[in-house]
Image (cartoon, rainbow, N blue to C red):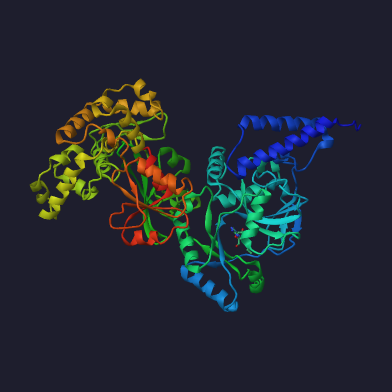
Amino acid sequence: MTAEIPEEIKKRVEELRAELRQHEYHYYVEDNPQIADAEYDEMMEELRKLEEDYPQLKDPNSPTARVGGEVLDKFAKVQHTQEMLSLGNAFSPADLRNFAARLQRMLSEEVDFDYIVEHKIDGLAIILKYEAGELTLGATRGDGQTGEDVTANVKTIPTVPLKLKKPVDIEIRGEAFMPRQSFQKLNEERLKKGEEPFANPRNAAAGSLRQLDPTVAAKRPLSFLAYDIINEESLTLREHAESLEKLAELGFKVNWHRPVDNIDRVIELCEEWVDRQQQLNYEIDGMVVKVNQLAVREKLGATSKSPRWAIAYKFPAQQKTTEVKDIKISLGRTGALTPTAELAPVEIDGSTVSRATLHNEDEIRRKDVRIGDKVLIQKAGDIIPEVVKVIKEARTGQEKQFEFPENCPACGEKVFRDPEEAVYRCINSACPAVVRESIIHFVSRDAMNIAGVGPALIDRLLEQNLIEDQADLYFLEKEDLIELERMAEKSAANVLEAIAESKSRPLTRVVFALGIRHVGLRTAQIIVDKFGTLSQLKEANQAELEEIEEVGPVIAQSITNYFSSSENLNLLEKLKRAGVTMESEKSEEQNILADKKFVLTGRLENYTRQEAKAEIAKLGGRVTGSVSGETDYLVQGENPGSKLQQAQEREVQILTEEDFIKLITEED
Ligand code: IVH
């Protein structure tokens, strides 16, 4: 039965496919959705229905084809048109310099070339073939010559276009990978079902792509970043940079890349990303450095294993195995009890790690960490080291399960588990550990900024009963400090001066310094703007607070809780007696960055130069053109200039864009 299909149905199907494709692109490739999920689902449902009613209209690359096709019993083998080589490795700046020197040697003097530096994504290389713009094949690398046809699984990856924006015949390569969040979620689900978790996102991605049942693959959210064009007859590409541009034009999400014209800058970029890799929502295990000019690549050629025109700079290993000697609890200023694994010390990336956070009780249970366990730990940049997993095969039976304490290890009071959080808290505001952390917060840079008063001095002052709380700092006398061992008269005077000077910090900073839960600098500023004085703020009720835009019920509750405690009210009285700012001066309202001098370098992702300047000015800070002894912060964007080095030399505090955003907006 081949009933004629009405024209308007055909038209509608084409229309829906085109629109869905476009929205898929906005959503997955551009990260910029243009319609609500529900509207998208509705269109998808309409298309599915029509394809069901008119099976003659079926199309293997219709947007409906992503949910997963038929179950296979094995994957077909695919012969690659061009062998997929691997990359040589560099492990140090010296290796990179050798690579550059080798290139120079092999090329004659006159040959001019530059580099493209890319992320080395820790996933699986995938080859995609398109005919007249339609996806016809997705294959794995295999042994480099023969791979496996995983087209059905590849189609479930939303960032793989099923139809390109132009009807070209083309073969491209890129990396399929599992974003960190999806990986975490997948592992949590596997644990719940009693299945073994995947060791890393790469294994998880490989496992998903090698699923014989594409509907299973479809439930494992993978992503894809393109990094090369292999075959495209009609194109006359001269540079790798052009290939990457072309890939973007065709509708691919393209791997991060930067053009660079000298090896020093290549090295700088590689090292920069060692520290920045955690900012990405997927894992990279290094950087790939490629010669940009295709003709130069041609000249350089390849060995049997790898091209001579590219090299992988591998990041230092960030995971090691070690033993959990003990599990201890530490307390934060909000009274939160955080379990920490004490480890047999191991060196990771040049620093010794002897502690790793276990986050909370649920996390210990989930990972089943016991005292005496061998564990895999991970550290990256300035991230707190954490336990990735327990090596259960190494268990001897001697391991001891950790019992979360019912009482605060610092003050002995009963601890409470917040029903909405996984966190236990000590709610004793006189708890010595909470007091200590609160004072450390009070003096910190973004709070009262009292130079010279750090954790070590605070500990000594507490031990000697010279202070009991933040406010006592203002009543210290020179003799008190001199009596403390190692404190000379001059430094005692400096400390007292710094303390006295902090009395005139703007009210916003005072409010932030109190350490009210959920009240970061920005919230402090908003509520100070609204209420003007501490006594007004103290009187504010839940409803009045919630009226303020940006203050929700949780923050409002936290603020009223704070001011309902008599200890806190006493503290405020004492601060007032000490002469600490209790009212905002009109002009000081927005001044959380008062008198701070900023220098900007490199491109910021979230602000133009003008916007960043305006933000800083709005908060009372100033932007200057060059680094000097007066500079407080250097904000470092992408491709920073020489100012970065100048700032490093002068030991100016360097902020990444993320740090900067935190500084101006962060809420605790
Ligand atoms: S280019 C001949 N670029 O690294 C060179 N590879 O050892 C072909 N990889 O199997 C690869 N990110 O899975 C290239 N930006 C990138 C990459 C990348 C990750 C992987 C790829 C390949 C392996 C090479």
Could you say which is closer to the camera, residue 250 or residue 517? Answer: 250
Q: Depth check: give the residue in front, 45 or 388.
A: 45
Specify whether 178 is left or right of 626: right
> What residue is rendered at 45% in x and 51% in y?
396
Question: Visible in this render: residue 400?
Answer: no
Q: Is residue 241 visible?
A: yes
Residue 46, given in percent of the width and then of the height, sits at 73, 29
Residue 352 position, x and y percent, is 36, 58
**Above or below, 493 relative to 188:** below
Tell me which residue sits at (23%, 26%) in the image.
535
Nearer to me, 529 or 334: 529
Task: Between residue 372 and residue 58, name the one nearer to us.
Answer: 58
- 44 lies above or below 88: above
| The image quadrant in which ligand 1 is located | bottom right
Please state, as top left, top right, bottom left or bottom right, where the N terminus lies in the image: top right
Residue 73 position in % (x across, y down)? 75, 47
The image quarter containing residue 406 is top left
Is 184 left or right of 532, judged from the image as shown? right
Question: Relative to residue 133, is residue 115 depicted above or below?
Answer: below
